[in-house]
Image: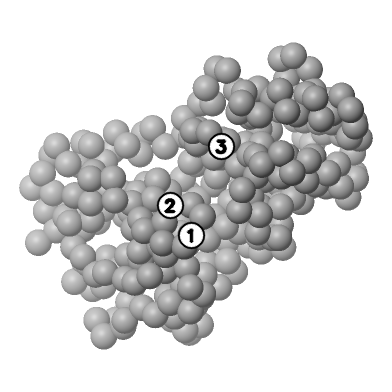
Amino acid sequence: MNILNTSTLAALEEMLQNSARSAPPDYLPLYFAGGSNPNQIMGHLNPEFIPYLQESLLKDPISCIALGHEALHIAAARPIELSASLTALAERMRLGGFIPGWRNEEFAWLDQNGHEYFRLERSAFRTFGFRSMASHINGYTKAGNLWLGRRSENKATDPGRLDNLASGGIAADETPWVNARRELWEEAGVPAHIAAQIAPVGRIHMRRPIPGKGFHDEQLYIYDLELTENFIPTNYDGEVSGFIEISITEAAARILADEFTSDAAFVTADFILRNHKNP
């Protein structure tokens, strides 16, 4: 029975209420002069990165980038020009050892109206605190159990931790819907005709500092997918070491025991709160 006690439910609700945390006060804000909201804060920079960046930009300035004592300013420019300047900045930070796990994949930064203003290597988004997007899919059975994947030990982030049935960063030129169906096949072997049955159920804004690295700011697009009792997930991209099928009561216990990635913990907690039975 998927019945949770009131203290567990309260803990999950409190966790979700704190999904979007503010940047620490010593993090340097990144102001963007373009877009629909001029001089908006579009990112945050770990103070540990600033001395290297100051020295680097003093020796070799980059177009559209100006580093002051209290903020880093990004000038308004056409998306192609802004992308080139930020890519040069990211390459500089990569050489300094501040962007590990370079992926050679691009994310797009969108403003509140959905307009794209630049594209950049996905691993650089966390370094600069830029807002990215990801899709997460809860795979569940009619009996109410959840299928969870365990991340490969070779993953650069959160190796070995529990994750949703499938999840992944939304690349430039992808929509959340397209990304969700692609990830379902690559990570869990869900065929297209089943993946097409995903149901959008909401979005969670995730913000948190990553000690020694950067600031994680991501919009999580959430989908639910009912799986038949005889379906067994199979990974094809090497990013998942295996899968487990568990009740939502066990999933709640594992969340509170800190066995999940941070993103998957929020998404799974949201599923549990939408589907639990009152004690």
Within the image, what quadrant is residue 229 found in? Answer: bottom left
Instruction: Compute the Cα span from label 3 to label 1.
Output: 16 Å
The amino acid type found where label 2 is placed reads Asp
Residue contact between numbered discs 3 and 1, judged by CB atoms under 8 Å: no
> Residue at coordinates 26% horizontally, 41% vertically from top-left?
12
Within the image, what quadrant is residue 242 found in? Answer: bottom left
The image quadrant where one finds the N terminus is: bottom left
Number of other residues with Cα within 10 Å of mark 2, as a class: few under 14, some 14 to 19, many 20 or more: some
Residue 125 relative to residue 259: left or right = right
Instruction: Identify the mark nearer the N-term, 3 or 1.
Output: 1
Q: Is residue 58 above or below residue 87?
A: above
Q: Is residue 236 above or below residue 157?
A: below
Q: Is residue 47 above or below residue 206?
A: above
Instruction: Compute the Cα span from label 2 to label 3.
Output: 14 Å
Number of other residues with Cα within 10 Å of mark 3, as a class: few under 14, some 14 to 19, many 20 or more: some
The amino acid type found where label 3 is placed reads Lys
What mark, if any, has residue 158 been given in the picture? 2
Instruction: Compute the Cα span from label 2 to label 1.
Output: 7 Å
- Secondary structure at numbered mark 1: loop
What mark, if any, has residue 155 been given in the picture? 1
The amino acid type found where label 1 is placed reads Lys
What mark, if any, has residue 213 been given in the picture? 3
State the residue in front, 24 or 227.
Answer: 24
Residue contact between numbered discs 2 and 1, judged by CB atoms under 8 Å: yes
Residue 65 relative to residue 146: left or right = right
Q: Whole-percent x and y of residue 134? A: 54, 55
How was this image coloured? Answer: one colour
Q: Whole-percent x and y of residue 42? A: 68, 33
- Secondary structure at numbered mark 2: loop
